[in-house]
Amino acid sequence: MFPTTIKGRGSLSNRNSRYEEHAREVFDDEWPQPADEDASRPATTVSMETARSIITRNDSPDIPFDRSINPYRGCEHGCIYCYARPSHAYLNHSPGLDFETRLYAKQNAAQLLRAELSRPSYRPRFISLGSNTDPYQPIERRLRITADILAVLEEFNHPVGITTKSASILRDADLLARMASKNLLRVFMSIGTLDRHIARTLEPRASTPGARMDAVRALSRAGIPTGVLLAPVIPALTDHDMEKIVFMAKEAGAIDAYYALLRLPHEVAGLFQEWLEAHHPLKAAHVMNLLRQMRGGKAYDADFSTRMRGMGVFADLLRQRFRKACTKAGLNERRIVLDTTQFRRPAALGDQLSLF
């Protein structure tokens, strides 16, 4: 018995997290079940939390930044492949439906960031906004926590990069353009497929692929250096769009592009296979077999040297295809390095002003 799909949600179930002592398994006992409207259309709840820190640091050798900010925990976009899903287990929630319906907003994010940047010992380095969950997911339209964070970064002239799947980033286009004019900001739009039918179930509450490409065009016209992140590349399901996305990105004004192979850490593997069986049953076995070929026989391998691109013949083919497409399109010809030398701490009320 496979779980039924839920309109507007990526997960089909609330699978147990790896930390729970007891497991729940759905089975059909052939007894009629009463209709449960709440179960068929689970609502989104948002809890305001007071965070203790706001800048997350990492030392992963395959990530080109060591600092990031995530205004929200959980993500309403509901991308079934999201590698951040397992983090919801730390909150005693399921990485399944809970991840996309039980959200947490860091209401004091801007205040914490201001305090961190104001410390005399702080030294500016590139910060990635949205490395885990999307900073422009639907609740940002109402809460505007990401906008408040960007306002603080602009005040301090601090460099930042934004990664998103949402065209609603254009609401902050004026602020982004001001920062970009000082070489303090760049944007990556994540587009993994051009197929609206696949995207509707794969990443149900993210902007459509077309709207995201239009956002790339609008951001580029506003003078904001914008790139495209082809992620995740799913073999035998979305990889056929690779070249077309690259060429469309170039036409829209993107300056560079990168890609990342589908990652299935911890509970994500089971959730993704469940999704495959429901939405693409005839391709499910083929997709998983190709993934295992690129992961040393496993659904996922966390080795830093291969987790982003995989290994083996098919992985090599993806690398060659992507490199040739970018060369032909004229992407990745120059590297954007944001400026850290303009960083300044605004004078606070009561501070002694400098003589010079």
Image (cartoon, helix red, strand yellow):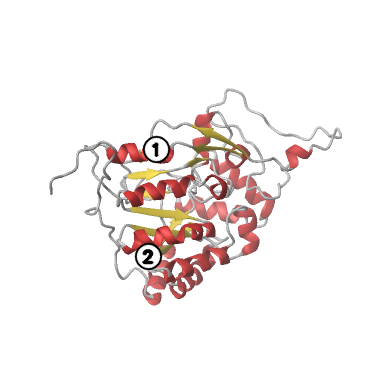
Question: Which one is closest to the eye, mark 1 or mark 2?
Answer: 1
Disc 2 target residue: 225
Amino acid type assigned to the residue bearing label 2 in the image = Pro
Nearest to the observer: residue 90 or residue 47? 47
Residue lying farthest to the left in this orientation = 356
Give the alpha-carbon distance from disc 1 to disc 2, as whole Å: 28 Å
Determine the residue positioned at 56% across, 61% down.
236
Relative placement, left or right, of 50 versus 11 is: left
107 or 79, which is in the foreground? 107
Res 63 visible: no
Residue 286, x across and y down, in percent? 59, 56
**Residue 199 at x, y percent in the picture:** 61, 58
Task: Check the image and name the residue furthest to the right.
Answer: 32
Q: Which mark is residue 75?
A: none
Q: Which of 351 and 337 is in front in this view?
A: 351
Residue that label 1 marks? 111
Residue 343 visible: yes
Give the side of residue 174 with respect to residue 31, left or right: left
> Label 1 amino acid?
Gln
84 to the left or right of 331: right
Q: How crowded is mark 2: few (under 14 residues within 10 Å), some or many (20 or more)?
A: many
Image quadrant in which you'd find residue 274: top right
Which of pointers 1 and 2 lies earlier in the amino acid sequence? 1
**Alpha-carbon neighbours of circle 1 within 10 Å: few (<14), some, or many (≥20)?**
few
From the top left corner, tell me how far across and down residue 185 is, in percent: 35, 58
Residue 62: x and y, percent?
33, 49
SS for callout 2:
loop
Residue nearest the viewer, comparing 122 with 92: 122
- If the image is split into quadrants, where does the N terminus sit? top right
